[in-house]
């Protein structure tokens, strides 16, 4: 179990590969909540065996947020719009990427300050989203 202590309200981050059965036990109850689905714009969360998931937890198994990484693209992020949780998850994911990787992230406006703080820059802007990149 690869866990890392974080400073977000005495939580920790658990790293899990895409098809590990523990992933579904942790995030399925979370991502099936109507509030989560609504806040995610009705979009499904996607997974493959190549995804690496970083899950922020408090207590035994209370999910406070997550994101996944696949081929340098940071995807499937959800944090209840808590930028502290997002920052901790991003820092952990970025710290484990190979030097020279071009990491990308599709951000909403409220996430821009965190991504800019971590060195991401906007490369494309649409009505609702900003594609951001950073060389690790």
Image (cartoon, rainbow, N blue to C red):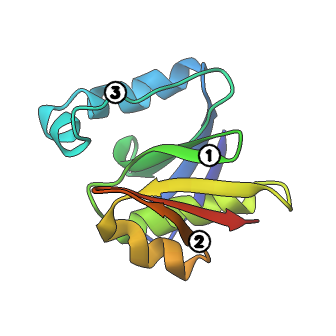
Separation of marks 3 and 2 at Cα, in angstroms: 25 Å
Q: Would you identify the image quadrant in which residue 15 lies?
A: top right
Q: Is residue 7 above or below residue 74?
A: below
The residue lying at 62 percent from left, 50 percent from top is 3
Q: Which marked residue is nearer to the observer: mark 3 or mark 2? A: 2
Query: Residue 49 location in percent, x, y?
Result: 66, 21
Query: Residue 66 location in percent, x, y?
Result: 44, 47
Q: Earlier in the sequence, mark 3 or mark 2?
A: 3
* Residue 9 visible in the current orientation: no
Is residue 79 or residue 59 the one in the foreground?
79
109 on left or right of 15 = left
Separation of marks 3 and 1 at Cα, in angstroms: 17 Å
Q: Earlier in the sequence, mark 3 or mark 1?
A: 3
Q: Would you identify the image quadrant in which residue 94 lies?
A: bottom right
Quarter of the image with the N terminus in it = top right
Q: Secondary structure at mark 3?
A: loop
Separation of marks 2 and 1 at Cα, in angstroms: 13 Å
Query: Residue 4 location in percent, x, y?
Result: 62, 57
Circle number at residue 120: 2
Q: Residues within 10 Å of mark 2 (few under 14, many from 20)?
A: many
Q: Earlier in the sequence, mark 2 or mark 1?
A: 1
Q: Secondary structure at mark 1?
A: strand
Q: Which residue is mark 3?
A: 44
Q: Would you identify the image quadrant in which residue 92 lies?
A: bottom right
Q: Which residue is mark 1?
A: 73
The residue lying at 20 percent from left, 45 percent from top is 39
């Amino acid at each position: 179990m690869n866990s890392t202590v974080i400073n977000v309200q005495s939580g920790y981050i658990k790293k899990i590969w895409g098809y590990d059965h523990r992933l579904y036990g942790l995030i399925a109850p979370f991502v099936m909540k109507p509030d989560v689905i609504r806040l995610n714009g009705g979009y499904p969360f996607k997974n493959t065996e190549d995804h690496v998931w970083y899950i922020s937890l408090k207590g035994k198994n209370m999910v406070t947020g997550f994101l996944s990484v696949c081929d340098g693209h940071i995807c499937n992020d959800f944090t209840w719009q808590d930028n502290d949780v997002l920052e901790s998850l991003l820092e952990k994911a970025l710290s484990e990427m190979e030097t020279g990787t071009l990491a990308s992230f599709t951000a909403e406006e409220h996430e821009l300050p965190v991504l800019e703080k971590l060195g991401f820059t906007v490369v494309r802007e649409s009505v609702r989203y900003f594609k951001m990149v950073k060389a690790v």
